């Protein structure tokens, strides 16, 4: 998978905030760059800001349910909290 400069910077910024051990234990989805980037991009496309999109990308939140709640009129932050 070829990453864009923007994707590499976003991923590096996320990992740069934590040690490798901390990343592996607290953010199992972050181990797979492709999954992280896809989830991060989808979160941004749903209108979440960078920080919240980053949190969504590393947590096991069902993005399809999140998108559905938002589509049905639920505020983004509320939808995020419901699915935590």
Image (spheres, rainbow, N blue to C red):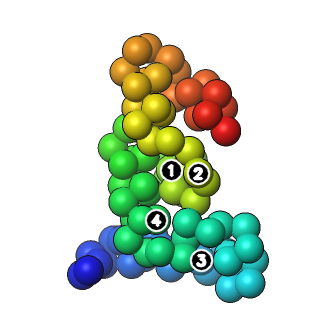
Q: Which residue is mark 2?
A: 60
* Sequence-first tag of 2 and 4: 4
* Left or right, residue 70 beside residue 78: left
Cα separation, mark 2 vs mark 4, equals 11 Å
Q: Quadrant of the N terminus?
A: bottom left
Kindly indicate whether the residue at mark 3 contacts the one at mark 2 (C-beta within 8 angstroms): no
Relative image position of residue 73 (x, y in whole percent): 43, 14
Q: Position of residue 26 (x, y in %)?
A: 73, 67
> In this view of the protein, can residue 64 be seen by the observer?
yes
Q: Which mark is residue 15?
A: 3
Q: Nearer the viewer, mark 1 or mark 4?
A: 4
Marks 4 and 3 in Cβ contact (< 8 Å): no
Quadrant of the snapshot with the C terminus: top right
Residues under labels 2 and 3: Cα distance?
A: 17 Å
Image position of 7 with respect to 72: above or below: below
- Which tag is nearer the camera, tag 2 or tag 4? 2
Q: Is residue 13 visible?
A: no
Mark 1 or mark 3, which is nearer the start of the sequence?
3
Are dots 2 and 4 in contact, CB under 8 Å? Answer: no
Q: Is 18 left or right of 37, judged from the image as shown?
A: right
Which element carries disc 4, helix, strand or loop? helix
* Residue on which the image places disc 4: 36
Residue 49 to residue 67: above or below: below
Classed neighbour count for the residue bearing mark 3: other residues with Cα under 10 Å, few (<14), some (14–19), many (≥20): some
Count the labels in the image.
Answer: 4
Q: Considering only order in the chain, which callout, 2 or 1, is on the residue closer to the N terminus?
A: 1
Question: Mark 3 or mark 2, which is nearer the start of the sequence?
Answer: 3
How far apart marks 1 and 2 lie (CA) works out to 13 Å
Q: CA distance from mark 1 to mark 4?
A: 10 Å
Residue bearing the label numbered 1? 53
């Amino acid at each position: 998978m070829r990453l864009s400069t923007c994707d590499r910077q976003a991923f590096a910024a996320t990992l740069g905030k934590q040690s490798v051990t901390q990343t592996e234990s607290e953010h199992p989805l972050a181990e797979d760059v492709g999954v992280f980037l896809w989830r991060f991009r989808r979160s941004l496309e749903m209108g979440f800001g960078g920080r919240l999109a980053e949190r969504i990308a590393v947590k096991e939140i069902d993005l399809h349910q999140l998108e559905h709640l938002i589509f049905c009129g639920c505020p983004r932050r509320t939808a995020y909290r419901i699915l935590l």
